[in-house]
Image (cartoon, grey):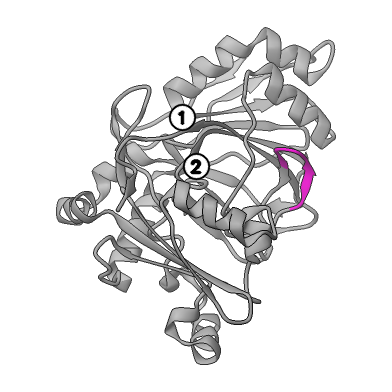
Amino acid sequence: MVEGPTGAGPDAPARALPVLSAGSPTGSAADWAARRRDEVHTLVAEYGAVLLRGLGVRSPAEVAEAAAALGIEQMTERERFAPRRSHAPGVYSSSAWPADEPMCMHHELSYAAEVPGLILFGCLTAPTSGGLTRVADSQQVLRMLPPELVARFERDGWLLTRMYHEIGVPWQEAFGTGDRAAVDAYCAAAGLDHEWLPDDRLRTRQRRAAVLPHPRTGVPVWLNQAAFLNERTMDPAIRDYLVDVYGPDGLPFNTAYGDGTPLSAETVETINAAYRAASIGEPWQSGDLLLVDNLRMAHSRDPYEGERDVVVILGNPVRFAGHVLS
């Protein structure tokens, strides 16, 4: 049974995720996923995401089996912005993030040369309260943003600068290797300018398109992390401390317009406000799966209380023409 989302009109954001209930399935979650695979992907194509309820997944291995049954081609994460545990190749914990702080809307790895087309989340343990994985349709977000802001990003793209040092994810973890030559090769292939600094530090810069056509529909989507990875999204006290200790160029990450012009606080808030207006979500139940079109739907995480264990699989990588800008 499918519980579809409702909205006030064709351009109004839906207020609930479509939920496909498994009822009392016979066999494993993977068996059910294999039988309903076409239906699941049809719902994702229509709505951008679908929650699969009642499958009772209890382990990372069961989530991986369901992903395979759904035809998801797992990919290895590179350039992660927050720590994760790796349960198995291509099977990760959700990003480590303080439970009492929200994680803002973002498209996973939208700054990488190869972007996950799909994300499968598996909830092994639902929190006592909060902790929703919300999604926002970036087609709607794009329509909500001021035309002049969109035009600027379409013209210049966006710039991400990262500093790998003792604060944040070490470069060895982000790139999956301790071999500097391998990092050099990755950066050259992925369009990253990089600079090795004293004390085993690494600085990278990458310029990316901010608006791209969805590869299946051709509809433009607001596909970037310009707001989420901007310094103004940090807690001001933490940002001020990091700037005081490491200098303005020492922040773990920061974003700008593609020509290097800093983003104003108003610009960052305008983008985040559009995400909030388009945000939808459904409280987790243990055993749920959530399949998301990562190219169309941004996702976030609410603060929560209690234990929360969500497994993540990134899959079906996509390379966009015109995404990597020089």
From the image, tell me which residue sits under label 1.
48
Inspect the magenta stretch and tell me whether residue 57 lies in it: no
Label 1 is placed on what type of residue?
Gly
Circle on res. 292: none
Q: Nearer the viewer, residue 157 or 232?
A: 157
Count neighbours of disc 2 (C-alpha within 10 A) and say few if under 14, some if 14 to 19, many if 20 or more. Answer: many
Please say whether residue 122 is visible from this viewpoint: yes
Direction from residue 72 to residue 59 in the image, left or right? right
Q: Position of residue 222 (x, y in %)?
A: 33, 44
Q: Position of residue 118 (x, y in %)?
A: 54, 32
Q: CA distance from mark 1 to mark 2?
A: 9 Å
From the image, tell me which residue sits under label 2.
135
Residue located at (57% from left, 61% from top)? 102
Q: Quadrant of the N terminus?
A: top right
Q: Which residues are magenta?
A: 85-91
Label 2 is placed on what type of residue?
Val
Label 1 with label 2: CB-CB less than 8 Å: yes
Q: Position of residue 130 (x, y in %)?
A: 66, 53
| Res. 288 image quadrant | top right
Residue located at (83% from left, 17% from top)? 28
> Which callout, 1 or 2, points at the residue further toward the start of the chain?
1
